[in-house]
């Protein structure tokens, strides 16, 4: 075994002062980032996804549940008051041994118990539970942002692939027409004795190969169209996008460090919040 690694170790970076504190930005609003492509059809589909996607609604419902749990846990910080009503009525019977009671009067009893409970948070259990609920709510909020970002990005990628398939299919359609004309011309030349049979076979093979590619592109486009329909919450049979040439312009990306991109990832923020939640839920221990 060697004495040390060839690459620099984390201790070397810390000694050289190359580490810097992270500035998490998981809660930064990203807005409608897909508008940088400048495609109105894509903008419409993204808005439909925001309103109708079921996975996004599930993530939003979990976030609402986590926020409600904060209030539920905070209820333990306040006294608990209980009040109950109990009413009884008793009347002696006329038929008793050795005694005869005429028209006995009924006797009534009304009880109104009052109960007051309050748990003194001497060891901080309730405070830690409330803090853990807040951490979970923040982590769930980051989960919602992660789901939204992933679904919108998936829709944008599927849409770009679909428009790319439209461009490829248009090119292949034109190629099929050109190869069909070339095959007809080669057959005419072969009938006139100016071309051998091998040229006809080669032209036929080119045409058949291009037709297969054209069919494959059509199948791939249908798959992307079905994926978009599922993302926007519509049945694939009731959804269609007419073919159109790709008109997306490449966005201008600002320069930045990969570490800055990591700080903007909501899934990393959610993991950090759940670590903090686990620390809050850890039982308190006496320390020297």
Image: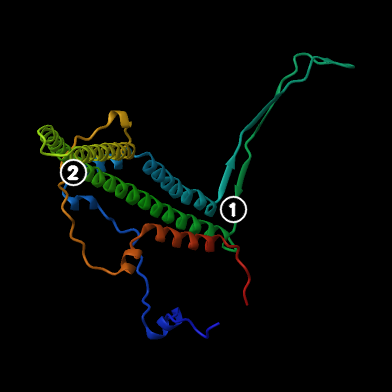
Q: Which colour scheme is used?
A: rainbow
Question: Looking at this view, is 146 or 278 the one in front?
Answer: 146
Q: Is mark 1 on a helix, strand or loop?
A: loop
Report whether 260 appears left or right of 174. right
Mark 2 or mark 1, whichever is nearer to me: 2
The residue closer to the viewer here, 20 or 198, is 198
- The percent position of residue 257, horizontal first and vertical second, equals 29, 69
- What residue is shown at x 19% (from left), y 39% (from top)? 203
Expressed as whole percent of the image width and height from the top left, the position of residue 132 reads 50, 58
**Which residue is the extreme one toward the right?**
98
Relative to 104, 56 lies left or right? left
**Circle on res. 234:** none
Locate the N terminus by quadrant: bottom right
Query: Which residue lies at the image location 28% right of the left edge and 56% below the top edge?
Result: 29
Alpha carbons under labels 2 and 1: distance apart = 71 Å
Counting from the top left corner in percent of width and height, residue 254 is at 21, 64
Q: Disc 1 designates what residue?
A: 118
Name above or below for residue 3 compared with residue 239: below
Location of residue 44 by image quarter: top left
Image location (x, y in percent) of residue 32: 23, 50
- Tell me which residue sits at (31%, 28%) in the image: 237
Q: Residues within 10 Å of mark 1 (few under 14, many from 20)?
A: few
Q: Which of marks 2 and 1 is nearer the N terminus?
A: 1
Say the numbered circle drawn on residue 167.
Answer: 2
In the figure, 18 relative to 44: above or below? below
């Amino acid at each position: 075994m060697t004495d040390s690694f060839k690459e620099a170790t984390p201790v070397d970076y810390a000694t050289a002062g190359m580490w810097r504190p992270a500035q998490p930005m998981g809660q930064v609003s990203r807005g409608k980032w897909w508008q940088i492509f400048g495609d109105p059809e894509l903008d419409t589909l993204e808005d439909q996804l925001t309103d109708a996607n079921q996975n996004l609604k599930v993530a939003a419902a979990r976030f609402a549940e986590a926020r409600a749990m904060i209030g539920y846990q905070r209820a333990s910080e306040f006294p608990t008051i209980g009040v109950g009503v109990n009413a009884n009525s008793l009347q002696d019977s006329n038929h008793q041994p050795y005694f005869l009671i005429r028209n006995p009067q009924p006797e009534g009893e009304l009880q109104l118990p009052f109960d007051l409970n309050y748990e003194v948070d001497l060891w901080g259990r309730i405070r830690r539970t409330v803090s853990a609920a807040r951490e979970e709510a923040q982590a769930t909020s980051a989960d919602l942002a992660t789901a939204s970002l992933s679904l919108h990005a998936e829709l944008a990628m599927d849409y770009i692939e679909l428009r790319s398939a439209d461009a490829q299919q248009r090119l292949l359609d034109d190629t099929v027409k050109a190869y069909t004309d070339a095959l007809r011309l080669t057959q005419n030349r072969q009938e006139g004795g100016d071309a051998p049979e091998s040229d006809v076979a080669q032209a036929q093979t080119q045409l058949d190969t291009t037709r297969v590619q054209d069919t494959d592109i059509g199948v791939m486009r249908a798959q992307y169209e079905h994926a978009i329909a599922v993302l926007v919450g519509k049945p694939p049979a009731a959804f269609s996008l007419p073919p159109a040439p790709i008109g997306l312009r490449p966005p201008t990306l600002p320069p930045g460090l990969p570490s800055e991109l990591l700080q903007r990832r909501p899934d990393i923020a959610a993991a950090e919040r759940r670590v903090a939640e686990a620390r809050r839920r850890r039982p308190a221990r006496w320390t020297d």
